Amino acid sequence: MSTRDDTTDVRDVPTERDDQPLLKISNLHTYFRTDSEDVRAVDGVSLTVDPGETVAIVGESGSGKTVASEAITRLFKSPPGYIPEGSIEINGREITDLSDEELRRVRGGEVSHVFQNPQGALNPVYTIGWQIREALQLHADVSKSEARERAVELLTQVGIPEASSRLDDYPHEFSGGMKQRVLIAIALACEPDLLIADEPTTALDVTIQAQILELLAELQEQRDMGMLFITHDLGVVAEIADRVAVMYAGKIMEKGSVEDVFETPAHPYTRALLDCLPGRGGIGGIPGELPDPRSPPPGCRFADRCRHAIDACRTGDQPGMHRVGDAPDHTTSCVHFEPGRDSSTVLDAGSEPAGSPSPPDDLERGGRR
Amino acid sequence: MKWYVIRRVLWAAFASFIILTITFVLMDQVPNQQLMQAEFQAAVNDVDVETAVQAEKERLGLDRPFHERYLDFMTNVFQGDWGWSYEYDQPVVDVVRETVPYSLLYGVPAIVLSTVIGTAIGLYSAVNQYTKKDYAATFAAFFGISIPNFWFGIVLLVVFGSWLGWVPIGWNADIPLAADGSWTLLETAGSDHPAFFRQDFEGERYVGILSPANLKQLILPTFVLMTGAIASVMRYARAEALEYVDADFVKTAKSKGVSNRAIVTKHIFRPASIPLMTILVGRILGLVLFGSYLIEVVFGIPGIGLASFQAIIRQDTDLVAITILLPTFVAIVGNLIEDIMYAVLDPRIDYGDR
């Protein structure tokens, strides 16, 4: 903590520190250049994370959640990736226009990442001690022996037994769960304000998953650290997050506190996702596919797969974020929640599986017409 | 680790043994030049050919049983008695001792420079994959691989030697030597030095390996040998590095705040260097030895390549055998070093001690 305090005077310290979010993303776009049209991986995402808070981004594969998380510290490959518009503020400082040099100080210093696949995330030819020390020495002026001590401390904190004797071991001498613990230790090495965890438990087996989640929650509480948690697993969201944002095809469909979103899921996509959870009846998944990210259809991105789609869903832009009920922060991007429309058409619809026998017939009839 | 090294060394010794045996059998099958000469002499002198050949066989020990000759051959090889060169009229060992330094003179700088430059270009190309810089480097590499050394050497000689007159056309084998014929790094000599045969000048000039005149005549052969080697090192380095450019651990490093330079040198090059060792030691050594044949013929450098070339043309059997065996042994030793380097560099390799 002491090293962090030394550097605060360099950063422009915001005046109203209390009600300022740790991370504020507004209207973020991230595109990837291709030979034809740009792939719009993230297409207007707004999100905040407060200190000490955990925000989860949920969505299926290809929804842009990983790109959104990597756009924060510009980790995506560039070129072809670029941010055409949008703003990212960390502790009140805009970071989209930082130089590479300045951004390097943010990476690992203020914002750390933990990635999905611990198997490949450690360099196979260096000892884990070396890899933790590297992170430490990049952001603080510490001697080799100090860094070594600190590394042992970190490894102990993330639950690696006999840490001092394992410093000189190579990554292949650790199991997957242990590697993820090492990676968490690396991410926490410089006391970041924000930890971005991109599906950190997906590649691990269930018992280890629970341990890692517990560890993350524990470390977060100790450090009062903000966490952005990317996952496709709604069960994990319920367990770890305070607030949740549901992403689909580069857009946020619904966001709100975990209780609100799970109790009163508003957007048809969120409802369909929740129906896919085991024990809720639906096992067929959501029929249809993600729209082409090069030329997304007009209107709501989910309209083609939505049971409640009406003509208004297929014109204009993605609907704005509308309040759901009386909950303060619970909003959704669905036309049925526009003021003046009846939101009960969605909210009161049963959760019978969407893939009922009728759609194929409909399609056939449509084809003959 | 100790047992691993011992096992590799034993394998190398076994491979050498097999190669020597095959060489012996092949040489035994080749018509013997001295016997043919004796036969010819006998015919000319009008004596009985059969007896003459038999006498010559006895003189050379060829009438003894196969296994005795085989044992003899093996003992001689290990004792450094590699036969007699009729062309040079001296033991093969001495021919090798005199010619190899000339080959090293341009071969060593070519290996070192092409490894360093080729790896650097390959890494650069991999990090900038599919950009104009990458295409330019890849194009240059294909160019380097496609151009035959001997042709490129002749073109360069015509342009820089004949037209521009920047480098000498004839290769002066005496310049790197001192007046008494021994190798020297740098010293001065008067016009009585053999290198300045038929040249008259006052005072002294530099001779020796590092003398300007010697460096000047080494530029073209080194450069020609390098073009092919750089290109292949570059292709390998690019392919190896590409495997790691998008690796998860590179992203981890980036998210830690590691600079782009350190990512390339520490996180990409270090793991890529392990398989690169294979190429650096084995392939490049072979490439250089193979390439030296035609380069030495084109430039007239009296190295081992030229000696081997002339030995083949003139059927100097013992010298041919040795000049072909030498690269083979270099390759065996190279592979041995490579195996040991692998074990040192890659922590994932289990030495399998006992």
Image (cartoon, coloured by chain):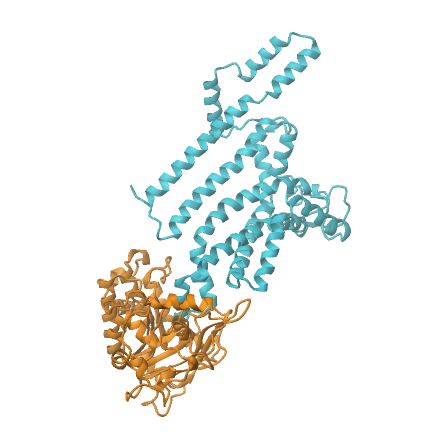
Q: Relative to B27, does residue A269 appear above or below in the rendering?
A: below
* Depth order, front residue of A44/B65: A44
Quadrant in which residue A107 is drawn: bottom left
Q: Is residue B193 visible?
A: no
* Depth order, front residue of B29/A244: A244
Q: Determine the residue positioned at 26% across, 61% down.
A: A205
Q: Relative to A248, does residue A182 appear above or below in the rendering?
A: above
Q: Which chain can be seen in orange? A: A
Quadrant in which residue A279 is drawn: bottom left
Q: Position of residue B82 (x, y in %)?
A: 53, 28
Q: Relative to A272, does residue B49 appear above or below in the rendering?
A: above
**Position of B353 compared to B275: left or right?**
left
Q: Relative to A272, does residue A15 appear above or below in the rendering?
A: below
Q: How many marks?
A: 0
**Position of A301 compared to B119: left or right?**
left
* Depth order, front residue of A234/A100: A234
Q: Position of residue A88 (x, y in %)?
A: 42, 81
Q: Is residue A273 visible?
A: yes
Q: Position of residue A273 (x, y in %)?
A: 31, 72
**Position of A179 compared to B180: left or right?**
left
Q: Position of residue A329 (x, y in %)?
A: 31, 86
Q: Determine the residue positioned at 53% across, 67% down.
A: A34
Q: Which chain can be seen in cyan? A: B
Query: Quadrant location of the C terminus of chain B?
Result: top left
